[in-house]
Image (cartoon, rainbow, N blue to C red):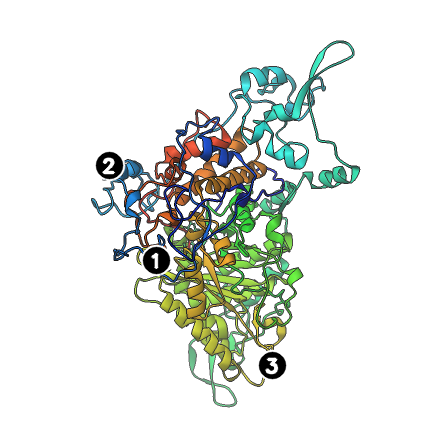
Amino acid sequence: MAEHGMADDVEGPISNPLDQSEPLEAGSADNTTKTANPQAEILPGDSAITKAEKVERHGDTSTGDVSADFEHPAPKRRRLEQEPGSTAAGETEERPTRQKGVTPIRKEFLVSISRAAEHDHDEDAAEASGKTAQPHTVGGRGGKKKTPGGQNHNRQFGRSRDEIQLCMSRAKVDEFATSSCQFGEKCKYEHNIRKYLKDGKRADLDTFGSICPVWEVKGKCSAGWRCRFAGSHSKEVEREDGRKELVLVEKEKSDEQTNREDELEEEGVGVVNVISNAVKISLRKKHIETGRSDQYLKWMNEHNQDPTNGRVRPEPKAVPGLVDDEGIPINVNKSKGDPSGVHDNRAGYVEPPFRASEKRRIYYGPETPVLAPLTTQGNLPFRRLCVSLGAQVTWSEMAMGLPLLGGEKGEWALIKAHESETAPPAYSPKTPVLDYNRSRDSKFGVQIAANKPWLALKTTEILTTLCPQIRAIDLNCGCPIDLVCRQGAGSALLDSNAKLEKTLRGMNAVSGETPITVKIRMGTKDKHPTSEKLVQRLVIGGPEAQEHGEDPCGVAAITLHGRSKQQRYSRSADWQYIADCASLVKKLKSERSNITDTAREPDARDLPASSFSGTGEGLPYFCGNGDILSHVDYNAHLQDTGIDACMIARGALIKPWIFEEIAQNQYLDKSASERLGYIEQFARNGLEYWGSDEIGVGTTRRFLLEWLSFSCRYVPIGILDELPPKFGDRPPAFKGRSELETLLSSGDYRDWIKISEMFLGPAHKDFQFQPKHKSNSYEIEAEG
Ligand SMILES: Cc1cc2nc3c(=O)[nH]c(=O)nc-3n(C[C@H](O)[C@H](O)[C@H](O)COP(=O)(O)O)c2cc1C
């Protein structure tokens, strides 16, 4: 669902935050004591010192007011090749019994309850699905009862706007340029650049070395005078007549560079899947045709399938006494497709109007950890950060079909991807995957939500036509939000298996070479899992399809989140159930030849764009999802359940370097300065994407705060008494190994604002923030 949009985006070099460290030691409160763990390996640090590191060393926040005593730098990365359950502090220490549900924090880092209470202040959240914010009372951990639900609704973010707004016709020109404002005298915006700079906007930011991050990468800044770093790309020059003019400065570039940038100016450098305003307007006016969907839907309509819900219409009743030549009862057919009104049951099925095109193959394997679709949180700057840390597959936030078809700007913004997401995922399978062409695969897929086959088909056709480089289109069948489910989308589809199958088959038919995937939960009702049956239907086709000799719906991958809709995030994800489904998929594969009609050889175009065995038989990849917080969880699930790949959601929000841990197969005890380095990287990504003017800075701040509402839940592994960290555990009040580390663990959104100010300067006076998910409750309501 669209939560943001706008702004041209530019690409730039990603500084490696790992280059900001110094060699320190693991598991100690200061850097003078060596770890007792003989397996702990201290990895060498690097020399580059960024703002993040300066802050940790000197408390120099420039614009923030974070307190300055950071004399205990945090330990560096360490290698802990430990089995789950072994101690982080050292093998020789006496191991306390791990208390269920409590994060095992070393006692020297525990603090009194008063500090915990300080963290809890922000618990006056709102009722879950109501549209009106209501007071929400929460006790301390294990304290009073909460009202149900986990979200603040109707959140306000204030407005980050200039005091006086500069007319767009003046934003990117030099002071003496003649005005091209079409509104002339009537224009309500400021045209005097000098006046605007003096009275209309806040002082330039002194973060990022006072250099505009957009200009630094792109050579020019599309915010022009409105940029919060305008001083870094402007100057005053004296003209021949002695007059002084304010001019914007562009970096010198070769002609080739300039040409390329002019070409990309409209689209935003480094961003793909950008749809022009003209196309969005055409969509709004319904001027863009969806011929394939129309044809397919017509067929559905004429041949017994209701395109509003995909159900096979009930067979008409037999007319008593009326039989054909062979004595078979004749039914009265009321469908439009049979004007005679007389219909033979046996001839009821007609082949679809066209076959699905042959699909681009995708790949999933242990080496492709997947970043889950994450509404609000999985924005482009965050995904870009995760890709830089090793995420191999990324998904857009869930985009709603209807606003996409209506050309809504905010929804189309969700489809944009960073160019780093267009690179293919890692690929090192034990046996090569038949017909897989890595150079044609990419990391980024788009997730959509739709409640009706027609909506899903048309959305798919439009998306694949306008953005052919999307890796795959995923249909969300897990979203538990009432607003979505009441309309029959999200996890409501789990209760309409036939409709879901038909929808997916239709999407596959109209998506050209783009593969279709699906993300499901275990079912809608708690303790009544139904997705095993659904998985079977998706892999081999449901009874209706089998009866008519139809091919399976052709999904390239199924991802199962091991929880029900009703369960939301309570209790752990059920990995046993995921394993059962994974083994069913395997079994179906081996039995497939018996199940499918042996008379018909499956056509390659009907086979999923997925894993192929040596015999060339296709089968969807099967991915598991739920509660992965470390490489240990990741490896264990891959090993024990027979899934092809793991999808990670909250684990990546809490510690985006989980992808790096997976690649290196080791815990990484990130120092507070390294963590701050990721925040800096996000801020940089955000300014490049949303822009460096007051609005762009405000948007970057808002989404940074959204992320910090999750990242504050990270408990540094260096202060843990026992590994692995677990999702169900809640930490008692603790302090970090440095003031910065303590600050990064704060659940108080005012501290998040302080952190944001280190990179984005003081928040605008009208900026507001209310966390979406209750900050310390460890319970969330999310869209999948
Ligand atoms: C903030 C948030 C937003 C989410 N948005 C989506 C979404 O847009 N689409 C979706 O399929 N799942 C969404 N989910 C669900 C996750 O993709 C994932 O299935 C779920 O969180 C379980 O994985 P985890 O235990 O690794 O967090 C969201 C989850 C969270 C926490």
Horizontal side of 716 relative to 416 (left or right) equals: left
Q: Which residue is identified by label 2?
A: 114
Among the 4 quarters of the image, the one containing residue 46: top right
Marks 1 and 3, Cα distance to the nearest angstrom? 59 Å
User: Which residue corresponds to the image point at 34% horizontal and 46% vertical from the top-left?
Assistant: 129
Secondary structure at numbered mark 1: loop
Q: Nearer the viewer, mark 2 or mark 3?
A: 2
Tag 2 near tag 1, CB within 8 Å: no
Among the 4 quarters of the image, the one containing residue 491: bottom left
Marks 2 and 3, Cα distance to the nearest angstrom? 70 Å
Identity, as a three-letter code, of the amino acid under mark 2 = Ser
Q: Earlier in the sequence, mark 2 or mark 3?
A: 2
Residue 576 point in image, percent of width and height = 36, 68
Q: Which residue is identified by label 1?
A: 91
Horizontal side of 295 relative to 570 (left or right) equals: right
Q: Earlier in the sequence, mark 1 or mark 3?
A: 1
